[in-house]
Amino acid sequence: MQNLQMVDLKRQYHKIKNEVDTAILNVLESTAFINGPDVQSFAKELAEYLDVKHVIPCANGTDALQISLMALGLKPGDEVITTSYTYIATVEVIALLRLTPVFVDVDADTFTMNIDSARKAITSKTKAIIPVHLYGQAVNMEPLLELAKEHKIPVIEDNAQAIGGTYTFSDGTKKKTGTMGVIGCTSFFPSKNLGGYGDGGAIFTNDDALAETLKMIANHGQKTKYYHEMVGCNSRLDTIQAAILRIKLRHLDEYCTARRAAADYYDKAFSNNPKIVTPFRAPYSYHVFHQYTLQLRGVDRDGLQAKLAKRKIPSMIYYPVPSHKQNMLKEYGTANLVLPVTDMLQDCVISLPIHTELTEEELSYITSNLLELIG
Ligand SMILES: *Cc1c(COP(=O)(O)O)cnc(C)c1O
């Protein structure tokens, strides 16, 4: 089996190559590299897709989170509740703004925020909650939104891994992930479900006033050129990226379907194996499988990874060290925090290749070898 990858961007590109190449060449000819017409068109098309009022493009997903926290006017020392079990960017921006990260545990089946833990973590200093739709699965938003409303705490959704996913409320209402909180953030990093060919990100909101503030902050705190109302930053989505993303957005639903089909194949192959726990699909979530992550039981994970690598099967540990134990946060003293589920998962998870181009032959090769290796 040749050239298996965690994410195969090349084959995906080749399917849309003509369209993408033309779009890039058009931007080159226009020379409107910054804030060209594709940026606004993409924002509008993404807003329609998500059914959200405002989409504010920015430079990357990390900036999207930082700008969101800045727009809420949080002050050093304010507490932000989130999960340790996430990509570090979620947590880094909290520390960067001198806010205090308050870590809560996740559920063992969904890998996402445990709502009871969030409830217990609320204090008078809690000024925001950041749920992370990890691996493509929606956080259980209904009880979280009720909790946040009760305490008047804004929710910022980290939707970097779940764009295209949906959440179903108990009355049957469906909403796209990233559009339920006061603010939603996403990333267009190439390997994300809606990935550009470079960095990119966006912020979503239904609040007009907040949208104005978010736009200002992303643009040096100015509404009128050279009149700066507040300290902001410089965070823009390139026109070339926007032109590419406009094309890829039209394929997003089909990309989600392809990822789900690969996940279905894996699930079936691994079902009823006592050493493997396949990813749970919460009934309220349309899971878009940014990652396909197994939990291993009684398996030497590192040994398995090495043996898979020998057979040219890539795998990854997302994430080898949970955020609360990272040296980055030393001064917050979170390393000894006990988050039993997070700690348990960190030692047993393994992610397999998942992307839009996996063939049945490749899936068969991966699953049969993995099953053989764990015995
Ligand atoms: C990728 C990612 C980010 C950051 O996005 P960048 O575009 O790389 O800055 C933030 N949060 C989560 C959960 C992510 O997976």
Image (cartoon, grey):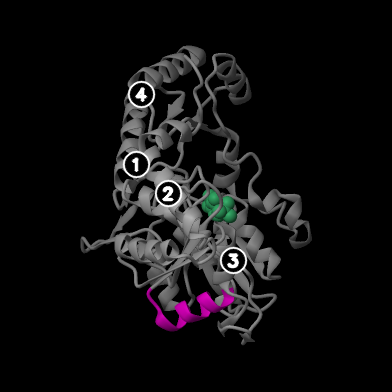
The residue under the point 43% across, 54% down is 243
Left or right of 294 in this view: 248? left
Report if residue 338 lies within the magenta region: no
Circle nearer the N terminus (1, 4): 1
- Tag 4: Cα neighbours inside 10 Å, few (<14), some, or many (≥20)? few
The residue under the point 43% across, 33% down is 354
Q: Which mark is residue 235?
A: 3
Q: For numbered disc 1, what is the local secondary structure?
A: helix
Q: Which residue is mark 4?
A: 359
Circle nearer the N terminus (4, 3): 3
Q: Are marks 2 and 1 in contact (CB under 8 Å)?
A: yes
Q: Which residues are magenta?
A: 206-217
Q: Is residue 164 visible?
A: no
Q: For numbered disc 3, what is the local secondary structure?
A: loop
Q: For numbered disc 2, what is the local secondary structure?
A: loop
Residue extending farthest to the right is 331
Residue 286 versus residue 38 in the image, above or below = above
Q: Which residue is mark 1?
A: 255
Majority secondary structure in the magenta region: helix
In the image, 88 versus 240, the foreground residue is 240
Q: CA distance from mark 2 to mark 1?
A: 9 Å
- Tag 1: Cα neighbours inside 10 Å, few (<14), some, or many (≥20)? many
The residue under the point 42% across, 37% down is 13
Left or right of 361 in this view: 65? right
Examine the image and state in which quarter residue 15 appears. top left
Q: Are marks 2 and 4 in contact (CB under 8 Å)?
A: no
Q: For numbered disc 4, what is the local secondary structure?
A: loop
Q: Is residue 11 visible?
A: yes
Q: CA distance from mark 2 to mark 4?
A: 20 Å
